[in-house]
Amino acid sequence: MTPVLSATQPNTHGRLSMLAFLRRINPALVMFLALMVLIVILSPLYRTPAGVMSLLQRAAPLVILTCGQAFVLISGGFDLAQGSLVTLVVIACAMITGGDPTLTPEALAIALGLGLVVGIVNGVVVSYLKVPSIIATLGTLLSVKGAAMMWSGGAPQGYLPDNLRMFGRMVIRPVPVIGSLPIAVIALVIAVAVLAFLLHATQYGRLLVMIGDNPRAAELAGVPVRKIRFAAFVVSSLSAVVAGVLLGGFSGVSVDVGTGLELQGTSAAVIGGIVLLGGRGTIAGAAFGALSLYALFTLLNLLGFPEPMRVAVQGIILIAAAAITSRRQLMG
C-alpha cells in the first residue's frame, strides 16, 4: 500500500496547488483578457500598440475613479457623489478659465479644493454624524449636481484651454516599442501606483481593511475608526477630481459628463472582486474591473448594441460578479 500512496500523493498535492493558484487569479483579469481578444478580432485598430494605448487613454478616468471608490467600499461604505463631482470639476474648470490658458493652475487648484470639501463633508457626515453612507452621499450627489447646474445655468458654458485639455488628449510621440504614450495613461499609472501603495503598503491601508471586515472589533482594538473612514471619503473624492480633469480634457464640457460614473465605478469594483460589505479587495482588482467594464462597453459598441442594452448588460455583469465574489469568499 505504501508505494501506491507515495505515487498518488504528489498528484493530489499538485492538483490542490493548481486549484489554489486558480482561486488566486482575479476573474476580472481573465474577463479583461477575454474581452480584449474579442475586440482585437472585431477591430484591426486594436491590433496595434497605438490602438491599445487609445483604449487605455479613454478608460483612464473610470479606472482612477474605481480605485478611489475602492477605499470607501473596502471600509464598508458607498460613495455615490463621485459622478456629480466629476461634472462639477469639468464645469468649474470651464467657467473659471473661460478658455484662458493662464488661468489653468487656478482652475486646477479650485477643482482640488472642491474635491477636498466634498470628501470632508462626506467623511464628517458618515464617520462622525453616523449617517449611512448611501444616504449621505446620495444627498451630496444631489447637492453637488444642483450646484453645478446653477453655476452653469443648466447648459455648458465656456471651454477648456489647450493646456488643461492636454491631460486627457495629449499624446507623446515617438515612444520606443509602443509608438505613442498618452498623458492620461501616465496619469493612470501614477494614480494606481499611489493608491495601491496607500492601501497595501501602509498602516492606514491595513487598518482600513480591518475596519471593513469587523468595525466593532477594530474599535475595541483601539483603531481610530472615524478618522480612517473619514480619510477614505477624501481619497475617493480626490480620485474623482483627477478623473474629472482627464475626462473633461478628452471629451470636453458637458453637464452630463459625470452622469452614472458612480454606478460604473461601483460595478467595476465588484467585478474586480471588492466585497460590497467591506473588508476585502485590492487596487489591482479594482483597476482590472474598470478595464473589463470599459472593454465590455467597447465591445458592445463594436457590435452595434444600443445604449439601453449596454446598461442592461452592465447590470447582468454586476450581479454575476457579485455572485462569483461571494462564492469565492465562501470557498476560502
Image (spheres, grey):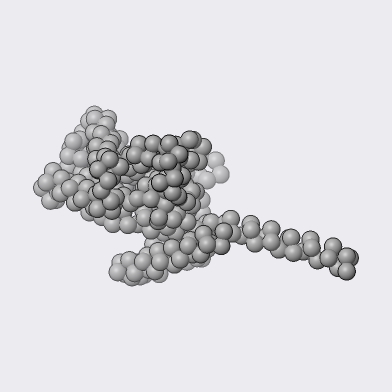
Q: Residue at x 12, y 51 (%)?
A: 154
Q: Is residue 197 left or right of residue 127?
A: right
State which quarter of the image contains the C terminus. bottom right
Q: Is residue 322 left or right of residue 23?
A: left
The x, y position of residue 218, in whole percent, is 43, 42
Q: Is residue 270 above or below residue 111?
A: below
Q: Is residue 309 above or below residue 59?
A: below
Q: Residue at x 40, y 41 (%)?
A: 219
The x, y position of residue 220, in whole percent, is 42, 41
- Number of callouts in the render? 0
Furthest residue in direction front, as rendered:
220
Viewer can see residue 185? no
Quick one: 71 or 330, which is closer to the camera?
330
Q: Is residue 111 above or below residue 67?
A: above
Q: Residue at x 33, y 66 (%)?
A: 311
Q: Residue at x 88, y 69 (%)?
A: 1
The x, y position of residue 114, in whole percent, is 24, 37
Quick one: 256 or 280, which is closer to the camera?
280
Viewer can see residue 177? yes
Quick one: 89 or 247, which is closer to the camera?
89
Q: Quadrant of residue 18?
A: bottom right
The x, y position of residue 232, in whole percent, is 36, 41
